[in-house]
Amino acid sequence: MTHGIYSAGSAMALLELRQEITANNLANAATPGFRRDVLAAREPAPGEKGLRFGPLTLPVLDTRPALEGAPIVQTGNEGDLAISGIGFFVTGADGGEFLTRAGAFHRDADGFLVNERGDRLLGRAGTVRVDSDAFQIARDGHVVVRGAVIDTLRIESPAPGSALRKAGEGRYERPAAIAVPGPADAAVFQGYLEKSNVDAIREMISLIDAFRAYEANAKSIQTEDHLLDKAVNEVGRVG
Amino acid sequence: MLRSLSTSATGMIAQQFTVDVIANNLANVNTPGFKKSRAEFQDLLYQTIGATGATGSQQARVPVAVQLGHGSRLTATQKLHSQGNSMTTGNPLDLLVEGNGYFQVTLPDGQIVYTRDGSFKMDADGSVVTSDGYPIEPAVTVPQDASEISVDAEGRFTVRLPGQSEPQEIGQVELARFVNPSGLEAIGRNLYRVTGASGEPILAIPGQEGIGPITSGYLEMSNVQVVEEMIALITAQRAYEISSKSIQTSEEMLAIVNNLRR
């Protein structure tokens, strides 16, 4: 009898989740290299355990970063790097290796290229250390100091079918299965910075859509409640 | 309660900081030797909830989980040490460094600090000082009866003294450069202090070892580009607005929940 209330309630719980993800996307609308999260829901496969909500089994939920590119703007700052196309920079920290699209690097006191966290940018020969103020990074990732190529930046992307998990602070956990995009698929631009790929219009529509669906489900709970009230208190009343 | 309330608030706070940084850049658009700052953001840590899936026995399924972000935060303001525009002044003590290099200045407590502001003056004793009266390092003193001060590309100060046919050298400035100039700490009055992040100063005479030559009679102005800052301002304002909209929506959702049971 109360099944309908649970249906509408579970929908409201999911819509809250969607709203929370939208809020995070919007809060990062100006975070360089940010990738918006997309919430996907599907029916549980046979044998798969879904989350329970009262008598109901909820759909299986999954968030994925949407990997489409973001606008790239010129900054003229020698440490700002942007990847046009697919792929991520690889940075090294105490916690291992991470992928990132946030390309605001600078030279630290020892000449290593680091980001604001202090994570070092990695090339094929290890950490990238430039001992000169004047260094160039070519489209193909070659690091050039005084005319000589000293290293090539590692540009990697997750292999098809493998999931990408966010580690926060602009980083992604480096999946076990990695693909290395060719020069035709990824070009490095020095002096440019990639913005966030959050599209304000899309997120605002999602916000309105989730809000109205939430409202509709609330109405349906109220209606169900009203019907129950009638059934319990008025059916069978005499006189 | 909805996490999105605090998530959106972090977005608004981050944008507020951006506007503060832009306001300071714009306020210094005509300050000689000023270097603009840039606010840098990151997304906050993610919470993984309801990790399900990957339990199906028949096929290997990609593990699924909902990752909920908690907004954004300001990580740092970075000083961008690009060259500012140059301005002709005709004053021989206005010095411009073309390229890398900072003037060294001695504070009253003996500490050496660094500046790109080359608008030097003479004090009552003939010492070459900054606009705030701090002497340049190595100190240069102009004799009382000297005339025709000039400074060459390598930072040599020469004057003409009465009774001498040749100009006399009275001192030479040394400039400092840093591995990571963005790591310098701005202490106000156009001055910077060495930090662990900037690395130790590397001293050389102008025009050598990666340090730029000096041009006398010119001033380096601020490297703030007004158009760039205005665009950043518009972007920050809109991003602020958009996060406030998601706070509003969350608030209305909570109101609906509160009205479920009347």
Image (cartoon, coloured by chain):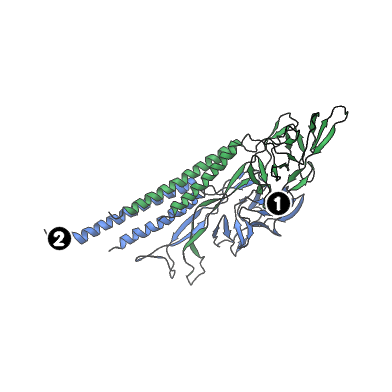
Chain colours: A blue, B green
- Return the chain for callout 2: A
Q: Is residue B155 left or right of residue B116?
A: right
- Badge 1 density bin: few <14, some 14–19, many ≥20, Cα 10 Å: some
Foreground: disc 1 or disc 2: 1
Judge from the rendering whether residue A159 lies leftward or rightward of residue A225; answer left or right.
right
Residue furthest out toward the bottom: B57
- Residue type, numbered disc 2: Arg
Q: Tell me the number on the disc at residue B199.
A: 1
Q: What is the spatial separation of the Cα atoms under label 1 and label 2, in whole angstroms? A: 87 Å
Up the image or down, B181 lies above or below B127; here it is below
Can see residue A149? yes
Q: Residue at x 47, y 67 (%)?
A: B53
Quadrant of the rendered image containing residue B126: top right
Residue A184: % across, % down: 65, 52
Q: Nearer the viewer, residue B57 or A92?
A: A92
Quadrant for the N terminus of chain B, please.
bottom left
Q: Residue at x 48, y 52 (%)?
A: A24
x then y, percent, for residue B45: 52, 57
Instruction: Give the labeled residue for mark 2.
Output: A237
Q: Is residue A235 left or right of residue A162?
A: left
Residue A180 in view, yes or no: no
The C terminus of chain B sits in image quarter: bottom left
As helix, strand or loop, the secondary structure at mark 1 comes to: loop
The one of B76 and B244 positioned closer to us in this rendering: B76
Q: Nearer the viewer, residue B43 or B176?
A: B176
Q: Residues within 10 Å of mark 2 (few under 14, many from 20)?
A: few
Task: Determine the image quadrant of residue B164.
Answer: top right
Q: Amino acid at mark 1?
A: Gly
Residue B153: assigned label: none
Question: Residue A73, percent across and down?
Answer: 60, 44
Say above or below: B218 vs B80: above
